[in-house]
Structures are given as C-alpha cells and as structure tokens.
Image (spheres, grey):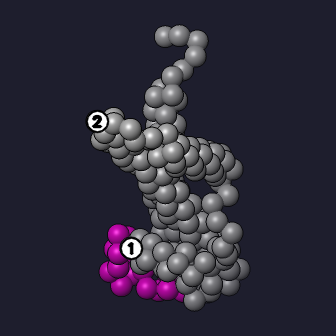
Amino acid sequence: MGLFKSKEEKERERNMAIKKSMRDLEKHIVELEKGEQVFRDAVKKAQEQNLPQQIEKARQALKESLTEKKRTYIMLIDAQIMIQRRNMMSRQKSFLGAVQTITQSIFASMKGVNISKITAGFDQAIEGAMAQTEQFDEMIDQTLSSGDFSSGSYEVSDEEIDKVIYGGASGVSSADSMDDVIAGLEAELNKH
C-alpha cells in the first residue's frame, strides 16, 4: 500500500466510519433502554416502600436516560438525512457526467456544431454538484465528530416519564415504543 490513499480508499474509509458511528448510536439506544427498565423498576419499588427521596432519584435518572435516548434518536435521524442528501448530490454528479458524455457523443457526430458552450455548462453543473458533495462530506465529518446534530430541545417532560413508568407495564413492546419515539422525532424535525 502506498503512502497516499486514493479517493476511492478515502471514500471507503469514510463510509466505514459513518456506518460504525451509526451502529454505535443504535447500540447506545439499546443500552439506554436497558437502563430505563432498571430506573422504572426502582420507581415502582420506591413507591411500594413509600420512599419519596428514592422515587425522586429514580425519576431523575429515568429522565436523564430518556433525554439521552431522545438526543441519540435525533442524532441518528439527522445523520441519516445528511447521508441521504450527500448520496443524492453524488448521484446527481454521476448523472450530469453521463448526460455530458451522451451530449458530446451526439454533437461529435454533427459537423459544425460548437459544443464548447454546452460542455462548459455541464462542467459548471458537475463542479457545483462536486462542491455540494464535498460540503456534505465536511458536514457529516464535523457532525459525527462533534455530536452536535440538532439544535432542538431534548428535555423530557414529567408526563413522558409517567407514561414510561406506568404505561411501560401495559404490554407495549420496545419496538412499538421505539417506533412511537421515531415518529415523534420525525414530526418534530418536520416542524423546523
């Protein structure tokens, strides 16, 4: 292997790092859900024993866990959106290159047609798509390294905590609650 990496190698490494980060976020959510069950049980036990300080401590820990899970979901969704937009720009660049090749082939068979203006337009469009793709690459790299995915509020309300504590025992599966959280986050993101 040489000292310098090709564009393809760098792209492959970036994609692997992004996939690893996404898996890490998903694992973090699973771990937070396990902790939530512990805190939920602690609230119920403290209530059975009439221990108000322990109830408050367990509720606070549950609130912190729920807030972190909400923040992680937002990071995951925002990262997926950025990656999709970047891929869209990359596909646009490929499409414009293919159209340019086709156009050049057509005009090459026609005598006396000046294709330099048309080619210049395609070159400009391709350069614009490349610049946007590079901007998305930089945004993704910065976001994944800083963890700053969204400026929205992450705070979890007391009502949400009560729903988790008292609604969690009603047979709601983790997948169902995860779908509800994702739907809520997507609705929140669409507001902005």
Query: Residue 123 appears at what percent x and percent y?
Result: 52, 42
First in sequence: mark 1 or mark 2? 2
Tell me the magenta residue range.
Answer: 162-177
Residue 97 bears which disc, if any?
Answer: none
Placement of 46 over or under 109, stated as above or below? below
Toward the viewer: 169 or 144? 144
Return the residue at label 1: 179
Q: SS of the residue at dot 1?
A: helix
Confirm whether residue 95 shows in the render: yes
Q: What residue is shown at x 42% (from left), y 47% (from top)?
A: 96
Q: What residue is shown at x 49% (from left), y 61% (from top)?
A: 81
Q: Report if residue 133 lies within the magenta region.
A: no
Confirm whether residue 40 shows in the render: no
Toward the viewer: 143 or 170? 143
In this rendering, the label closer to the viewer, 1 or 2: 2
Q: Report if residue 171 lies within the magenta region.
A: yes
Furthest residue toward front: 112
Horizontal arrangement in the rendering, residue 174 relative to residue 135 (left or right): left
Horizontal arrangement in the rendering, residue 175 relative to residue 60 (left or right): left
